[in-house]
Image (cartoon, rainbow, N blue to C red):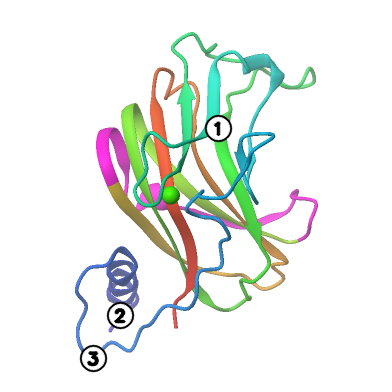
């Protein structure tokens, strides 16, 4: 089996396609806490263990919330909506040119070990998106977030855009040496998705053994 065939087989496994009986792949336990967004901090309305990208400049134009009106499983999902009035460019930092921003739900795990293979997966539902929503994993060298050793998007392998019902997305990644932690992000970017909505559910990372 060459490298391309190997990667294709792993991705097929990650997405859930049938794989040859000779394969010995199996998945470990889920390393993402509250990836189904069923546990919510009542006082702030955000899912336990997750944070949201919010900036004061666009607070009136973006909704990041846990909703009970739409879910893949359980009662809740994580929702993002970018209003049609959202500015094309925003001044996030006076020392830089106007920025674009990706609005994300994010969480972390320190249980991914360097040198191992993992599957990042989840379910995404979209409304009026101009390009794919994403799950992304970032392998971080330390707790400061400044040194990202590697990042991988599910949208490269399993893009979900436009108006789509719940769709499983997945990608396989290996963890580089010196990785101290892994951050997972579920989001969409502005200005591409102005006027769009996205729901995320059952976000998982499992070791591929
Ligand atoms: Ca759920």
Q: Quadrant of the C terminus?
A: bottom left
- For the residues marked 3 and 2, what is the alpha-carbon distance in whole angstroms? 16 Å
Residue 46 position within the rendered picture, expressed as x and y whole percent measured from the top left: 61, 39
Q: Residue at x 55, y 56 (%)?
A: 34
Q: Is residue 62 above or below residue 69?
A: above
- Mark 3 or mark 2, earlier in chain: 2
Could you say whether the residue bearing mark 1 is in a helix, strand or loop? strand
Q: Is residue 184 above or below residue 15?
A: above
Q: Is residue 131 above or below residue 83?
A: below
| Within-10-Å neighbours for mark 2: few <14, some 14–19, many 20+ | few
Q: Is residue 80 above or below residue 30?
A: above
Residue 10, which numbered label? none
- Mark 1 or mark 3, earlier in chain: 3
Q: Residue at x 28, y 74 (%)?
A: 9
Residue 180 position within the rendered picture, expressed as x and y whole percent measured from the top left: 73, 66
Q: Does 180 sit left or right of 4 as displayed?
A: right
| Residue range corresponding to the magenta coloring | 142-166
- Mark 1 or mark 2, earlier in chain: 2
Q: Which residue is mark 2?
A: 2
Q: Which residue is mark 3?
A: 22
> Is 60 inside the magenta-drawn segment?
no
């Amino acid at each position: 089996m060459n490298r391309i065939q190997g990667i294709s087989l792993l991705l097929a496994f990650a997405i859930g396609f049938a794989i040859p009986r000779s394969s010995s792949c199996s998945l470990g336990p889920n390393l993402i806490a509250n990836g189904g967004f069923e546990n919510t901090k009542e006082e702030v309305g955000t899912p336990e263990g997750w944070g949201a990208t919010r900036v004061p400049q666009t607070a009136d134009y973006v909704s990041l919330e846990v909703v009970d009106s739409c879910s893949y499983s359980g009662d809740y999902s994580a929702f993002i909506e970018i209003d049609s009035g959202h500015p094309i460019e925003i001044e996030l930092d006076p020392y830089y040119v106007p920025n674009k921003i990706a609005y994300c739900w994010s969480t972390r795990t320190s249980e991914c070990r360097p040198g191992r293979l993992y599957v990042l997966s989840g379910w995404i539902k979209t409304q009026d998106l101009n390009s794919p929503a994403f799950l992304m994993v970032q392998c971080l060298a330390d707790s400061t977030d400044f040194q990202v050793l590697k990042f991988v998007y599910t949208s490269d392998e399993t893009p979900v855009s436009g108006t789509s019902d719940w769709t499983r997305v997945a990608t396989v990644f290996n963890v580089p040496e010196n990785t101290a932690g892994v951050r997972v992000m579920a989001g969409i970017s502005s200005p591409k998705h102005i006027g769009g909505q996205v729901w995320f559910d059952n976000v998982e990372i499992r070791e591929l053994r």
